[in-house]
Amino acid sequence: MLAGEYALRILSTEPAMISVRIAAALAACLIVPAPQDVPVGYDDTPMLPNSQWRVHDGSRPQPTIVTPGAVNTAPPSDAIVLFGGDVEDLDNWAGGPWSVVEGTMEVNGKGTIETKEAFGDIQLHLEFSTAPGEQATSQGRSNSGVFFQRIYEVQILDSYRNKTYPDGQAAALYGQQPPMVNASRRPGDWQTYDIIFRAPRFGADGKVAEQAQVTVIHNGVVVHHAQKLLGKTAHRTVASYGEAHGPAPLALQDHGNPVRFRNIWVRPLDL
């Protein structure tokens, strides 16, 4: 008997004997994992610098799965709240507009949004929820992303029992570096990113003098620490730095997939 069938039988025949907590645990068995024998990633993309792996390499080892703990959601007193649950908070964003549903901001197919305010070095907190019951696999499952200065992406994806190329899973520096571990919660649960972003520095000649760096904490678990970015995010090619730039907006991607956001705030830093 399959685990899901066993869970259904228990839930349907002995409800009085099961606590809510046990029932929820059994219901988790009903989530159908993505087929593991379906090829993911690419084998014809360029090699990443100082690496044995290609961009979006499907054979790259999958990050170890860890179970995250509880979430602290309250913004500090000096935070700039970009979305706190009110329709009026959409005034902080350009593009879209996205929908506000039950105190959350929801991707609705109207395009990527970005903050009206420009930022350099920042601490970012955001919470997101991927869609439960979605049947897509790999990059098709609740795909989005948070872009620092419009061009440096930390991937958002449903990576709970959903295999994809490691540098494209949740919390990856897309196309560059997988997270150290997979700390994803199940679809429908709220997840957190706490990210410290240090913007790149450019010399007088317009060339990058210091690469951008990010530290990413996913659901309370460190998955990147002071990781240098190869450049602006790219698909199927090695990232590189373009023209010199200063502070720029923070962006949230509309990839055409259902994702909800809440409790988004930043603290400008001087790193």
Image (tube, rainbow, N blue to C red):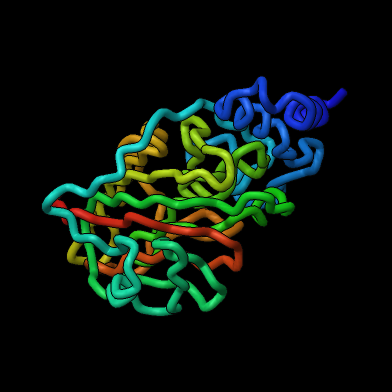
Residues 250 and 128: in front is 128
Where in the figure is residue 264, as x and y percent of width and height? 32, 57
State the image coordinates of residue 117 (x, y, percent, origin top left): 23, 71
Task: Using residue 186 as the reference point, say whether residue 32 is left or right of it.
Answer: right
Dividing the picture into quadrants, the one containing residue 15 is top right
Depth check, front residue: 43 or 126: 126
Q: Can residue 123 be seen in this view?
A: yes
Residue 141, position as x, y percentages in the image: 64, 53
Quarter holding the N terminus? top right
x, y (%) of residue 138? 68, 49
Q: Where 167 falls versus 246 (above or below)?
A: above
Relative to 116, is 185 on the left or the right?
right
Answer above or below: position of 197 versus 81.
above
Residue 70 shown left or right of residue 36 in the figure: left
Q: Which residue does the image show at 51% across and 60% down from the upper left?
A: 234
Q: How many numbered marks appear?
A: 0
Name which residue lies at 17% across and 55% down: 79
Residue with the most extreme top position: 17
Residue at (57% x, 66% y) in the render = 255
Between 88 and 143, the one nearer to me in the picture: 88
Q: Which residue lies furthest to the right in this view?
A: 1
Can I make out residue 240 in this image?
Answer: no
Q: Taking 105 as reference, is 125 left or right?
A: left
Residue sitting at x 43%, y 65%: 105
